[in-house]
């Protein structure tokens, strides 16, 4: 985003400059003082756990030129040269995102949501569209009511395509973000029983994800996964054009074959416009192949060259915690899928592990899956049984539900089982149990912090050169 004069920022936020110079400029925007840059605007958010007003002094030291506040700055605290007062900082940030969107109607706006795979689909779609255009995409997991406006505010000058990821923690959030983004193309990757602490049923999850289709303009294009019945139902909420994908015979992008493996990455073959296209990814697992097909359908919905986009997608590496593969000494291989977990995502990874033929053992290091509501015990026991059915030879289970998972896995035939209350304890001991040639999948919800285990393995064994 080009530098914004404070006069424009005042207009965006709907606030009032109580100190400073309207001709001054902000060159970046943030809510976390640890990530602020010189010349930034700091939005002092008030939340349940913390109050950004207490960090205005840190923001000043980090180089903020303006603070957007709703309360008085603490007496005696250093403050940026300029201060904008608003009624609600959270709403002011959203207003700024909406201003960016309205100011850039020439950009093609793509919105991606779904229960699983939305981040990978976003990265692949951005790479595919990047074959021809300058693309801006959601950084990291900036996919909620705070992250989406910040994504828009960070958009560089000259952007031609914006690929924006959205997530939901409850009904109405996707609707609000869809109104903000006003996408030209919208994708729901899939609908699964996740976030069940916030929803009563899979139908409620579907309705929340389907808000994207319901709120898109009539002339926008919906990208529809025909293999997911819940997505198909939700797609009826959009009366405009659609591009479909999947194994379903009528799909516009018809998936013919998937090569499910970790190395050298998943492969897929599909037909589009009477042409057969094969894609060799650098990301492992059948789930990656399905995410790639979804991203290619986004490219098709945008009217772009699908084959050229596929060639670009073949260069994309898995992100940290999202299936990244580390080759360690002693022939040990680690699949770092530690960013998040859910029953369907775990099932997909276990199927890829089942199909793998490592020189050593199949090892699963599994952290608890969170936000499962009253089904958490049953689902963690089922995870243990799935591990046994997938041919896992050693399970290391971590978290409050670890014992449930471990006992179910042992009964299903997993020969070696260990369980730990937290990831730090597991990280300290895992190296003692590994053998040459082992293939290790590390999976777990991010609050269980399974990345500690990956880091411990990298430190102990080191990557092959």
Image (cartoon, rainbow, N blue to C red):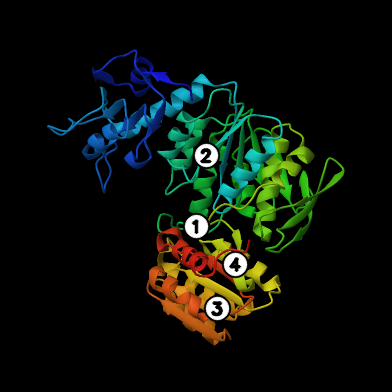
Q: Secondary structure at mark 4?
A: loop
- Asked if 218 appears above or below 369 in the picture, the reply is above
Numbered badge on residue 328: 4
- Residue 254 or residue 24, whichever sits in front: 24
Q: Specify the quadrant of the image occupied by residue 363.
A: bottom right
Residues at discs 1 and 2 in contact (Cβ within 8 Å): no
Q: Mark 1 or 3, which is nearer the eye?
A: 3
**From mark 3 to mark 2, how far is it between C-alphas?**
37 Å
What residue sits right under mark 2 in the picture? Answer: 138
What residue sits right under mark 3 in the picture? Answer: 434
Q: Mark 4 or 2, which is nearer the eye?
A: 4
Q: Earlier in the sequence, mark 4 or mark 2?
A: 2
Q: Earlier in the sequence, mark 4 or mark 1?
A: 4
User: Viewed as shown, does residue 401 lie left or right of 394?
Assistant: left
Residue 9, position as x, y percentages in the image? 36, 20
Q: Earlier in the sequence, mark 1 or mark 3?
A: 1
Residue 198, position as x, y percentages in the image? 41, 54
Question: Which residue is drawn at the image coordinates 50% and 57% (left, top)?
Answer: 339
Question: Which residue is drawn at the image coordinates 65% and 78% (left, top)?
Answer: 360
What residue sits right under mark 1 in the picture? Answer: 339
Question: Which residue is drawn at the image coordinates 63% and 29% (left, top)?
Answer: 134
**From mark 4 to mark 1, how far is it between C-alphas?**
20 Å
Give the number of marks: 4
- Residue 180 or residue 355, whichever sits in front: 355
- Asked if 374 appears above or below 35 in the picture, the reply is below
């Amino acid at each position: 985003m080009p530098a914004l004069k404070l006069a424009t920022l005042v207009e965006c936020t709907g606030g009032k400059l109580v100190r400073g110079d309207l001709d001054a400029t902000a060159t970046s925007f943030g809510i976390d003082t640890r990530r602020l840059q010189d010349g930034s605007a700091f939005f002092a958010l008030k939340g349940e756990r913390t109050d950004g007003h207490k960090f205005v002094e840190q923001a000043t030291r980090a180089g903020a030129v303006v603070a957007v506040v709703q309360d008085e700055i603490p007496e005696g605290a250093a403050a940026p040269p300029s201060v904008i007062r608003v009624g609600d900082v959270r709403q002011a940030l959203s207003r700024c995102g909406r201003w960016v969107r309205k100011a850039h109607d020439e950009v093609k706006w793509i919105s991606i949501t779904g229960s699983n795979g939305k981040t990978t689909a976003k990265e692949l779609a951005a790479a595919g569209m990047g074959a021809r255009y300058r693309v801006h995409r959601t950084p990291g997991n900036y996919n909620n009511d705070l992250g989406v406006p910040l994504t828009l505010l960070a958009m560089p000058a000259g952007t031609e395509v914006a690929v924006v990821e959205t997530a939901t923690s409850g009904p109405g959030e996707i609707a609000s973000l869809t109104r903000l983004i006003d996408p030209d193309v919208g994708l729901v990757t899939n609908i699964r029983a996740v976030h069940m602490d916030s929803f009563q049923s899979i139908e409620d999850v579907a309705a929340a994800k389907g808000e994207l289709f319901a709120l898109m303009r009539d002339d926008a294009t919906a990208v529809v996964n025909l293999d997911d019945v819940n997505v198909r139902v939700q797609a009826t909420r959009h009366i405009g054009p659609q591009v479909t994908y999947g194994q379903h015979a009528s799909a516009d992008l018809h998936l013919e074959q998937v090569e499910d493996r970790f190395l050298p990455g998943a492969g897929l073959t599909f037909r589009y416009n009477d042409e057969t296209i094969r894609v060799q990814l650098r990301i492992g697992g059948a789930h990656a192949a399905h995410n790639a097909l979804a991203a290619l359908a986004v490219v098709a919905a945008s009217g772009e060259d699908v084959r050229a986009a596929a060639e670009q997608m073949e260069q994309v590496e898995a992100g940290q915690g999202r299936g990244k593969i580390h080759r360690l000494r002693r022939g040990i291989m680690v699949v770092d899928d530690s960013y998040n977990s859910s029953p369907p995502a775990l099932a997909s990874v276990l199927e890829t592990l089942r199909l793998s033929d490592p020189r050593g053992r199949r090892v699963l290091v599994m952290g608890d899956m969170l936000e499962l509501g009253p089904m958490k015990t049953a689902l963690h026991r089922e995870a243990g049984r799935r591990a046994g059915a997938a041919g896992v030879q050693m399970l290391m289970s971590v978290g409050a539900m670890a014992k449930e998972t471990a006992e179910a896995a042992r009964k299903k035939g997993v020969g070696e089982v260990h369980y730990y209350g937290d990831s730090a304890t597991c990280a300290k001991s895992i190296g003692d149990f590994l053998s040459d040639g082992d293939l290790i999948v590390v999976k777990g919800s991010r609050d269980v912090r399974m990345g500690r285990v990956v880091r411990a393995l990298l430190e102990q064994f080191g990557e092959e050169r």
